[in-house]
Image (cartoon, rainbow, N blue to C red):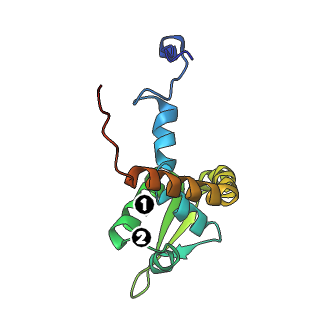
Amino acid sequence: MDTNFPDLRQYGGANAFFEACKPRIVFDIFTNKWTGLAIGALLGGPRRFNELRRMLDGITQKMLSQTLRALERDGLATRTVYPTIPPRVDYELTDLGRSATVMLGVIAGWSGEHADEVIAARRAYDERAAKPVEPVRSG
């Protein structure tokens, strides 16, 4: 198997293995643990911060804030502040954010189909790793 990947940048192409490559920059958005889940939670329409926090089991307030800020920065979500007392803040997917749900839906479907296999593989690996290694005796 050839593991030498050509640097296509000199020809106007991209190589996602390079850190500064545009596709890699975008790919990094979706490899965050909470990004896909937050996008999924926003798929149903505008949501308030605490509503999202209740939906995303296990997320901390700080991580939710960082995730929502990143989604807004990347153009995937909007933040709307209403002039009420106390202020009301809603988060909602943009058209770009909604377009990402197609890809995330495929990942969610694959995850559902293969979850049992992945869990079984983890158990088997953990069982192998837990067994003591027999020393090799030289003769």
Residue 109 position, x and y percent, is 70, 57
Report helix, strand or loop for mark 1: helix
Q: Which residue is tagged 1?
A: 67
Residue 135 position, x and y percent, is 30, 39
Q: Are marks 2 and 1 in contact (CB under 8 Å)?
A: yes
Q: Answer above or below: position of 74 versus 137.
A: below
Q: Residue at x 51, y 62 (%)?
A: 78
Q: Amino acid at mark 2?
A: Ile
Q: Residue at x 66, y 55 (%)?
A: 114
Report helix, strand or loop for mark 2: loop
Is residue 66 found left or right of 74 in the rendered image? left
Which quadrant would the C terminus be assigned to in this image?
top left
7 or 129, nearer to the observer: 129
N-term mark: 2 or 1: 2
Residue 31 visible (yes or no): yes
Can you tell which mark lies on residue 59?
2
Residue 99 position, x and y percent, is 66, 51
Q: Residue at x 68, y 53 (%)?
A: 110
Residue 1: quadrant of the picture: top right
Is residue 130 found left or right of 36 in the rendered image? left
89 or 121, nearer to the observer: 121
137 or 69, nearer to the observer: 137
